[in-house]
Amino acid sequence: MSKVVVPKKTVQSKQSRSRKNQAKQNITPSFMQWRFGVVVGLIFLVFAALTARAAYIQVVNPDALIERSDSSTMRVRNTAVYRGLITDRNGEQLAVSVPAKAIWAQPQTIAKNNALEDKRRWQALAEVLGQDVDKLMSKASNPKRKFVYLQRQVSPAMATFVQKLKIPGVHLVNESRRFYPAGEVTSQLIGFTNVDDEGIEGIEKLYEEWLTGTPDSRTIRRDAKGRQVEIIVQEKGKKPKDLQLTIDQRLQSIAYRELKSAVHYYKATSGSVVVVDVNNGEILAMVNSPSFNPNNRRGVSAHRIRNRAITDTFEPGSSVKPLAVLSALEFGAVDSTDVIKTSPGWMRLGGSIVRDSRDYGDLDLTGIIQKSSNVGTSKLALSVPKEFLLDTYYNMGLMSDTGTNLIGENQGIFNEQKRWSEFELSTLSFGYGLTVTTVQLARMYSILGNGGEKIPLSIIKSDEEKVPERVLSEANAQRILTMMESVVGEGGSGKKARVAGYRVAGKTGTSRKAVRGGYGEQYVNIFAGVAPVSDPQIAVVVLINEPKGDLYYAGDTAAPVFSSIMSSSLQLLNVAPDAKEKSSFASLLEIQGETHE
């Protein structure tokens, strides 16, 4: 077999190509190597991003992370705090806060557990809450909401029932509600709070800051099992303060009972009573009718809520006639023994006529008050300078603030003018041409009872000393009281205001209500008085607004109410009888005293 000889040059060429091929494979990376590089690069980028994010969260903006951590571990615990008590002068509770529950829902939890599908439980809940079941369920049907109230201030019995229903997402939370033990007796004076326990009427609103406190606060940290592991912050709250009124709840109840009965009996539109301690200006009772129950205000109209004794004004009529006599005495225009001619029972002033109900002839100052002579008071008012007469009205507490600072108090209407006609001054003397409130009239009579010293009226019990202001002489104040005593005597217009065993000084007032173009046929009946005359202790003003029927004079309507309230008040305050002739009441006291001894 012949041997094939390959040329050396050809072999070398093949080896050279083989080496070239091998070198090319070493230079070009494989697919695996390229993917590895990409992965490593991505990992590096991820770690770089995570590092940057961690640095941003923990160094640049750590607040959000801290907030999220605190929201899951930190809790704020507040102690329960209730509004301060409101009591009368003897400590009797008039307003007190009691524990209550609020029913709230968590719509997210309700949606998560499909709790709305169990309509039977929701129907039971709606019935106990007095709500429509569809409306109740709609409140809790929005899964985007985290919290919604279903009912506030529910009773313990209702709260227990709700717990037994075990509706997922429906919970209870503690709160308080205001309770008024005296109910409608003190409702307009005390006022009330709203569902958030904030005062919105009366004393509750006026002293909101005083009665409201802030709870003690404690910020804690919890572990995963909800156990307290750290107290972070403790803050001391502000305790609410109690409030003591000058009101005597016993007198308040008596006054309200008598007034409510009279308003109903005489079919009157409304009525008010104010009782004042003449020695210090403290208001012992302030009531209105119609009233309302502050513990259940559903359907109560606005006219029942307002405190008419301070908001409603009226022309006082004859109840201010003593001021005309007083101004003439103070100025020196007349003496207490002078006699005024009132015949023929009328007098012309300019183009107008002033009339009495009949011709009383010659009257002394006592007779002018007893007979309530318009002619007599007009002549006395015109016997003094205009400025002196007007100052007397101001000094006696009319047309000015009484000092109670109660919300909504009206200062009355008085049209001050540069020029006054004789007829205008005349009508002012018998209570027309100005309007006052019941509490302003009570202040006027308290000044008479206090011997001519004016003290601001007060509704809040305080140790602060009041500085009296003398506005008329003590002698003339006593003379006026003695003259007004004749009003409840024989021949007076207020005989029904007598109080057995006590000397009473008072004055009736029957004024027509103004309407467009003049005066209508509606009346305001007033009786205001002080007792006992020998040592005045309390002043009482009774107002009956728009009585219906045959009895529309103050002597028939307001006077009997005055008598009942004054009699009960004097007995409760332990005021000794001062009548010269012993009444059956005084005799009864002596018998009881002898029996007791």
Image (tube, rainbow, N blue to C red):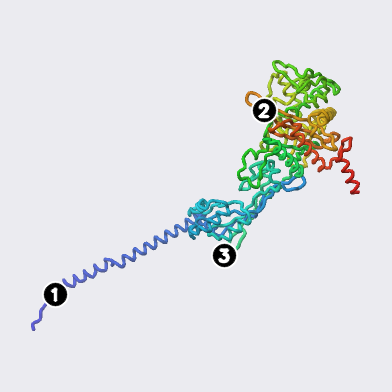
Residue in the foreground of this view, choosing between 64 and 549:
549
Label 3 or label 1, whichever lies nearer to me, is: 3
Q: Secondary structure at mark 3?
A: loop
Give the mark nearer the N terminus: 1 vs 2: 1
Circles 1 and 2: CB distance less than 8 Å? Answer: no
State the CA–CA distance, disc 3 to disc 2: 78 Å
Q: Which mark is residue 8?
A: 1
Q: CA distance from mark 3 to mark 1?
A: 90 Å
Instruction: Give the side of residue 468 with respect to residue 219, left or right.
Output: right
Image point (89%, 43%), residue name: 590
Q: Nearer the viewer, residue 517 or 444?
A: 517
Query: Residue drawn at (81%, 43%), measured in percent from left and top?
Result: 572
Residue 210 horizontal side relative to residue 119, left or right: right
Please identify the residue farthest to the front as the structure is shown: 550
Q: Which residue is mark 2?
A: 521
Label 1, secondary structure: give it. Answer: helix
Say which label, 3 or 2, has the lower sequence index. Answer: 3
Above or below residue 559? Residue 214 is below
Quadrant position of residue 432: top right
Q: Is residue 388 shown to the viewer in this render?
A: no
* Front residue of 153 and 108: 153
Mark 3 closeness class: few <14, some 14–19, many ≥20 residues within 10 Å: few
- Give how far across and how far down residue 146 sits, in percent: 52, 54
Please identify the quadrant where the N terminus is shown: bottom left
Q: Amino acid at mark 2?
A: Glu
Q: Nearer the viewer, residue 171 or 154?
A: 154
Which residue is the site of mark 3?
Answer: 225
Disc 2 secondary structure class: strand
Give the mark, 3 or 1, whose residue is nearer the N terminus.
1
Whole-percent x and y of residue 583? 87, 38
From the viewer's perspective, is residue 368 above or below residue 497?
A: above
